[in-house]
Image (cartoon, helix red, strand yellow):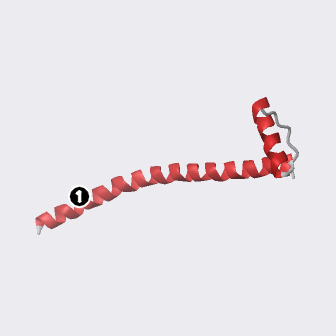
Amino acid sequence: MKTLSLKLDDEIFNEAEEITGALQVARNRYINEAVSIYNRVNKKRLLKNQLAKESAITSHDSMNILHEFEKLIDEN
């Protein structure tokens, strides 16, 4: 495990304290779980953006191929 110094806004800290108290979960465990969830959300967001870019590239190539096939069909 890595040690981390973290500064939280007072409001965020107080809310986390209330929730960890109600759930009877250690603050460290709560923050670890929160960061883990946030990492998963952002990995999905990055993947979505990457797939959108690659899809746009593929779409352009697919349209070019489609036009080539149409030309071949029109010639016959």
Query: Looking at the image, which residue sits at the far top?
Result: 10
Quadrant for the C terminus in the image: bottom left
Give me the residue at 72% from left, 52% from top. Answer: 36
Give me the residue at 88% from left, 45% from top. Answer: 3
Mark 1 lies on residue: 67
Q: Specify the quadrant of the image occupied by residue 7.
A: top right
Give me the residue at 62% from left, 50% from top. Answer: 41
How many tags in the picture? 1
In terms of secondary structure, where does tag 1 sit?
A: helix
Q: Residue 1, image x and y in percent?
A: 87, 53
Q: Is residue 14 above or below residue 63?
A: above
Q: Is residue 8 above or below residue 31?
A: above
Q: Specify the quadrant of the image occupied by residue 15.
A: top right
Query: Looking at the image, which residue sits at the far bottom?
Result: 76
Q: Residue 43, image x and y in percent?
A: 62, 52
Residue type for callout 1: His
Residue 9 located left or right of residue 69: right
Q: Nearer the viewer, residue 40 or 24?
A: 24
Q: Residue 11, image x and y in percent?
A: 76, 31
Q: Nearer the viewer, residue 6 or 51?
A: 6
Residue 71 located left or right of residue 2: left
Residue 19 located left or right of residue 76: right
Give me the residue at 51% from left, 48% from top. Answer: 49
How packed mark 1 is, by other alpha carbons closer than 10 Å (few <14, some 14-19, many 20 or more), is few
Q: Nearer the viewer, residue 28 or 19?
A: 19
